[in-house]
Image (cartoon, grey):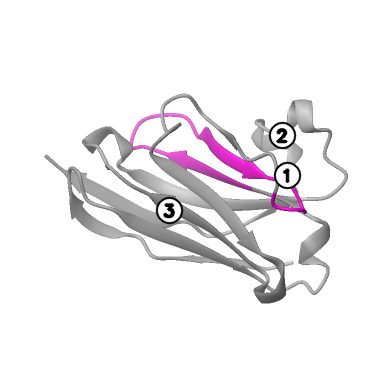
Amino acid sequence: VQLVESGGGLVQAGDSLRLSCAASERTFGRFVMAWFRQAPGKEREFVAFIVWSGGSPNYADSVKGRFTVSRDNAKNTVYLQMDSLKPEDTAVYYCAAGSGIILSTARRGGAYTYWGQGTKVTVSS
């Protein structure tokens, strides 16, 4: 499975961006999809995940109420709508996919088998 992220860029605080992650796999609909991020000098952290049906999206506290994860299984694509961006959202954002994930572990990067190459988001103050 190949995952290709797009949509990153340089924005100002308060702006919005929408990241996309396109999957090569026709069985995309079976996967739990997630977004993680890694800021310079910091460890990778969980951002959001969404199950195959699109229901029960789950968010890190730091982005809850500002970010929205969604998926279009017909297009093999998952999205991350990021609103009210803050400088602390600056990071490389990674898309991840996995099957057979126990949802209680879905915030852990180790639960995912497939990763994209990342897309950089920079938020200036």
- Mark 1 or 3: the one toward you: 3
Residues under labels 1 and 2: Cα distance? 8 Å
Mark 1 or mark 2, which has the lower sequence index? Answer: 2
Q: Which residue is mark 2?
A: 106
Q: Amino acid at mark 2?
A: Ala
Q: Mark 3 = which residue?
A: 81
Comparing 64 with 4, the one in front is 64
Residue 72 highlighted magenta (yes or no):
no
Q: Are marks 1 and 3 in contact (CB under 8 Å)?
A: no
Q: In this picture, which residue range is highlighted in magenta? A: 34-54
- Disc nearest the viewer among 3 and 2: 3
Which residue occupies 71% across, 35% down? 110
The kind of residue tagged 3 is: Gln
Which residue is rendered at x = 47% and y = 29% of the image? 43
| Left or right for 110, reference 3 | right
Q: Is residue 106 left or right of residue 119?
A: right
The secondary element bearing badge 3 is classed as strand
Give amino acid for label 1.
Answer: Tyr
Q: Bin the neighbour count of mark 2 within 10 Å (Cα to Cα): few under 14, some 14-19, many 20 and up.
A: many
Where is residue 22? Give x, y as percent. 60, 69
